[in-house]
Amino acid sequence: MPAWRGLLCLLLCLCFGQTAIAAEIPALNQNLNNYSKSIAEARKFDSMLRGASRRGSKDPLLYQAYQARATLRTSPNDLKANEILCDAQFRTGFLAAAAKQCRDTLKINPNSAIAQTTIANLLWRQENKATAAKQILTQVLVAQPNYTPARLLLAEIANAEGNSIGAANAIQNAVTSDASAPTLVALAKMQIDAGKKDAAKASLLQALQADANYAEALGLLAQLYGDGGDFARALDFAQKSAAADPKSALAQFRLGSQFEGLQRYDEAVAAYRAAIRLDPNFAPAHRQAGLVLLAHGSPVDATAQLQEAQRLSPKDQTITNALQQAYLLLGNTQAAGKYAAQDQPINTAPAAPQATRLNQQLAQALTAEQRQDYAAAQRIYEQVVIDNPASPDGYYHLSRIFRAGGNAPQAYRFVELALARQGDYNPALALRSRMKCYDRQNVAAWQDYAKAKQAGYNDPQNELFQFLSQSCAKPAAGT
């Protein structure tokens, strides 16, 4: 072969070789970045384990992981220890470390159900690769048909994809093979999403038969009973949930919600603040603490909580409206103007008489309700409250809106605010009478009805009287 041809071949090989290497550089860099991240996370995880050990932590997950790490120092191929670390790193949020640890586990045993399921979980949650995740989970269930974590993850993926039948089948199969608390809670969550709240309660109560201190079941029961207005029972579950999981901000928030529903506002604020201490970025806790403080005469404290809530949740219009009201109560109209809703600016022009403006606002809100635009109606009623903080009207109508939307705690809060401004405001007394009847507070319901009639309430066609007579046993004379 002529020398020039040999030189040409060499140059072509070098050029194409460099091109291939160049094409691989981004993937190589990504792999190196992932590897570096996994090593860094593994070190942080080990540091967390050592700290937990020094503090004498009773967390079984961390204790098992600490023991597993000790085992691997002398037996690096111990399958059980590798699986424990794979699972623990994933469950504590060290996802890059978990991915590497699970791959290492699969090198020891390619059929490890724990490692395969965790890899599938990572593929779905981190990379949105549902098809690949489902293929792995199917392989797991072929080898271990009763492996519950794989069935639960399949159900979760199916539910996210809108395949409610597939999700229900996967959950039912999981419950049949393993009626444990986690499985029953997963079933309850799907029932809640489907609007089957009574069925969800039954599943959660069954979960507590399997594990009486299962915090997630207790918390969901608190939420369900609270949403239904049974705050006394909800509080019992919320307190048990907070005791079972004292580091959960969500458990403290649910506890605050039930205290608020029971009108125990100081305890509600204390619980919301406990949630904030556990998770300073928990926006709903800042929001509710601010709203309760604002409604009960602490606009300065409320402003601090509401500002933080808005920083964390800038698109929440309720927070914006509450900040506007807080600054108006503080006499700072300039600051209040910054928080005016775009479609409801503070009117700086000469205004019509207050009564005329109020009537116009109420008419606009009623029109919005008639077209079932309850969000618009709520915004108008909130503006009524801002414009007329001493009047019961806006508070009463907000109570109606929240009650219609199933938000019993807020409905109670605003009806109380209306009556705090005018104790004989008969529409609010009538509304509270109906609400008390729903909550089986028969005596209080009839007392409010009597007060409403004394204050001039015109019961159209005796509708409320008939409702109370049918739904709430009338107390005996003298009760």
Image (cartoon, rainbow, N blue to C red):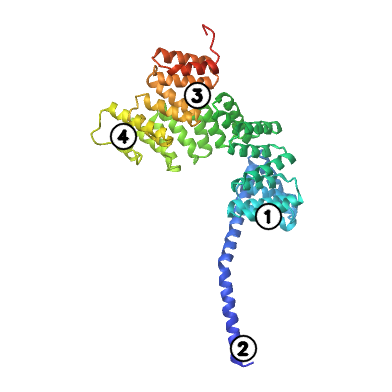
Residue designated by label 3: 264
Q: Residue at x 61, y 52 (%)?
A: 124
Residue 207: x and y, percent? 68, 34
Q: Residue at x 64, y 92 (%)?
A: 1
Residue 135's tag is 1
Residue designated by label 2: 6
Mark 4 element type: loop
Mark 3 neighbour class, 10 Å CA radius: few under 14, some 14 to 19, many 20 or more: few
Going from N to C along the chain, the mark reached first, 2 or 4, is 2
Distance of label 2 from label 4 (alpha carbons) = 86 Å
Mark 4 neighbour class, 10 Å CA radius: few under 14, some 14 to 19, many 20 or more: few
Going from N to C along the chain, the mark reached first, 1 or 3, is 1
- Residue at the far bottom: name it: 2
Residue designated by label 4: 332
- Residue at the far front: name it: 461
Indicate the amino acid at tag 2. Gly
Determine whether 11 is above or below 349 in the image. below
Which of 316/397 is in front? Answer: 397
Q: Residue at x 34, y 34 (%)?
A: 327
Indicate the amino acid at tag 3. Arg
Please give the count of numbered marks on the rendered protein: 4
Which of 361/237 is in front? Answer: 361
